[in-house]
């Protein structure tokens, strides 16, 4: 009787394992491919802004659409560090955003989107720094499975995320 019960339990566990691990592997591959696509889309977006020196509302809309085409929803955070107009001005004050003799002021996503709505273009200057962070907001199947297994061993949650930044090489006209 006990041998039969152990055999039934072993067959049941083997069937579950034969389903769970392939499903976990395939969903992990889908997330890896998606993360690679998001990195590529974000990198191309940053490179286009760096080389042209401007962000248009059309470019931004296409960027958001390309991200949506991956099948997930994302939280996009933009930050532009604008180089001070008077880089040679000497001062005795120290600030956390001072890099060498240059001062940068930060402009964030909501401010950038407001300017894009009003003017249709956000012009940057050579020497400005741009940064884009993309994080998924929905939970994928691989994330559900990994978060379950990671919570068992005590690790942090898994998310699709990427950060790209760069220095503007051309002044937008």
Image: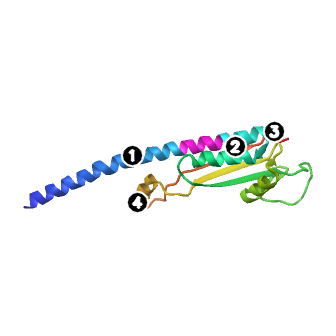
Q: For the C terminus, which image quadrant?
A: top right
Which is nearer the eye, 138 or 164? 138
- Residue 46's disc is 2
Q: In the rendered image of this protein, does residue 38 appear above or below residue 3?
A: above
Callout 1 environment at 10 Å: few (<14), some (14 to 19), or many (20+)?
few
> Residue at position x 39%, y 57% from top?
149
Q: In the rendered image of this protein, does residue 16 appear above or below residue 62?
A: below
Q: Give the magenta range.
A: 35-43
Which is nearer the eye, 13 or 59? 59
Q: Measure the C-alpha gap from mark 4 to mark 1.
A: 15 Å
Q: In this figure, which residue is indicated by the disc labeled 3?
A: 170
Query: Sequence order check: which comes first, mark 1 or mark 2?
Result: 1
Query: Sequence order check: which comes first, mark 4 or mark 3?
Result: 4
Q: In this figure, which residue is indicated by the disc labeled 4?
A: 148
Query: Sequence order check: which comes first, mark 3 or mark 1?
Result: 1
Is 61 placed left or right of 94 in the picture?
Answer: left
Callout 3 environment at 10 Å: few (<14), some (14 to 19), or many (20+)?
some
> Residue at position x 76%, y 47% from top?
129
Q: Is residue 158 visible?
A: yes
Q: Measure the C-alpha gap from mark 3 to mark 2.
A: 13 Å
Q: Secondary structure at mark 4?
A: helix
The stretch drawn in magenta includes residue 41: yes
Callout 2 environment at 10 Å: few (<14), some (14 to 19), or many (20+)?
many
Q: Secondary structure at mark 1?
A: helix
Q: In this figure, which residue is indicated by the disc labeled 1?
A: 25
Q: Measure the C-alpha gap from mark 4 to mark 3.
A: 47 Å
Q: Are marks 1 and 2 in contact (CB under 8 Å)?
A: no
């Amino acid at each position: 009787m006990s041998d039969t019960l152990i055999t039934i339990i072993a067959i049941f566990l083997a069937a579950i394992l034969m389903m769970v691990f392939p499903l976990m592997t395939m969903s992990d591959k889908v997330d890896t491919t998606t993360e690679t696509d998001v990195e590529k889309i974000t990198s191309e977006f940053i490179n286009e802004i760096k080389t042209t020196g401007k962000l248009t509302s059309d470019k931004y809309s296409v960027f958001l659409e390309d991200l949506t085409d991956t099948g997930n929803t994302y939280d996009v955070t933009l930050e532009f560090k604008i180089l001070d107009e008077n880089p040679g001005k000497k001062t005795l004050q120290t600030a956390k955003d001072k890099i060498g003799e240059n001062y940068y002021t930060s402009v964030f996503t909501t401010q950038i989107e407001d300017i894009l709505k009003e003017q249709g273009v956000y012009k940057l200057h050579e020497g400005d720094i741009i940064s884009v962070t993309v994080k998924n907001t929905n939970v994928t199947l691989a994330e559900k499975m990994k978060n379950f297994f990671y919570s068992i061993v005590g690790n942090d949650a898994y998310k699709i995320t990427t950060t790209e930044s760069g220095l503007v090489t051309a002044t937008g006209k």
